[in-house]
Image (cartoon, rainbow, N blue to C red):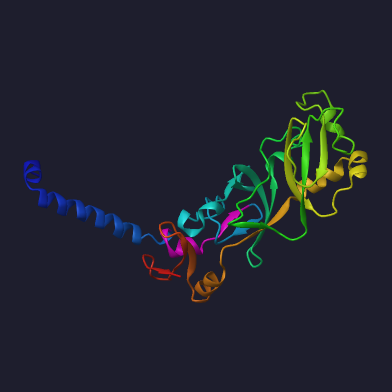
Amino acid sequence: MNSHLFSSSPFLSLVCFLLVVFAKIQSSSSNPYSTYESGSIQFQCGNITAGYPFWGESPQGLPRWEGCGHPEFKLNCEHNGDVAIMMIKEVKYRVLDIKSINKTQRIARMDYLEPEGICPPAFPNTTINSELFDYSDGYQNVTFLYDCPSNNNLALPLPYKPCSSSEGVQHKNLFIQEGDHGPGNCATSVFFPVPKNSLNWKAINDDHLLLRQVLDQGFELKWKLRSISCKNCNNSKGSCGWDLVNKETICFCPNQPSSIVLF
């Protein structure tokens, strides 16, 4: 091919460029796993199975690409394909359960699942994106207060004893208080949602396994994305996805992988 011809003819160069772009679009639209079929695939990891608004690599099946779910609902599969992981506000959570019908998920902080994770935690406060999530009914915040002075006037219960150990534990003590508070006179604080009436301060100091049980069972979130449009899409044999440009729910139509219906 005469390269001089292209260099001397901008029009031919433009035509060639447009043909390449068109070919890429055609190739992309002919790939069923980029639209409808990919949106129909369930994310699978361990005992977790999830569709819209979740997406991510699925070692137990084909992947759900990014357009099949909301950007904040990405799932990763770790620990040899047994543990589903989700990041919220830079905190790493294990996904324990997903109920799409109720639009709820139960998650647990990965650092608190470690035997000594509570002393100290690897991540900051347990916060959520309030535009996307709400805590389910029946939860309240408690605050873990670290390294409080012995003469504090916070009217705190007795310290959680494992943190007062000198064997590799970085914090001198840990107090647990109802509500979400700043550190005050203590070195730092972390708040965390727990089921209401699940904590008895005296019982926890007598039996630390009670707090471990509360942390291990995690907490439940409700997501706020509209489900009516998705239900209509599914009823019409389509699969829901997310428009990354217009930032809204879309419907991938069967047998038309390049067609997108906006709600």
- Taking the magenta stretch, the answer to whether it contains residue 38 is yes
Asked whether 41 or 176 is in front, the reply is 176
Examine the image and state in which quarter residue 171 appears. Answer: top right
Residue 234 spot, x, y in % from top left: 52, 72
| Count of marks, rendered view | 0
Q: Residue at x 62, y 57 (%)?
A: 133
Q: Is residue 247 left or right of residue 93?
A: left
Magenta span of residues: 34-45
Residue 226 spot, x, y in % from top left: 56, 67
Q: Is any atom of residue 93 visible in this view?
A: yes
Q: Is residue 217 left or right of residue 263?
A: right
Asked whether 243 or 20 is in front, the reply is 243
Examine the image and state in which quarter residue 176 appears. Answer: top right
Q: Residue at x 49, y 67 (%)?
A: 239
Q: Residue at x 19, y 51 (%)?
A: 17
Q: Is residue 107 above or below residue 207?
A: below
Residue most extreme to the front: 153
- Taking the magenta stretch, the answer to whether it contains residue 128 is no
Q: Residue at x 47, y 54 (%)?
A: 66
Report the quarter where the N terminus lies: top left
Residue 240 spot, x, y in % from top left: 50, 66
Residue 77 spot, x, y in % from top left: 59, 47
Q: Is residue 101 above or below residue 166?
A: below
Q: Is any atom of residue 98 visible in this view?
A: no
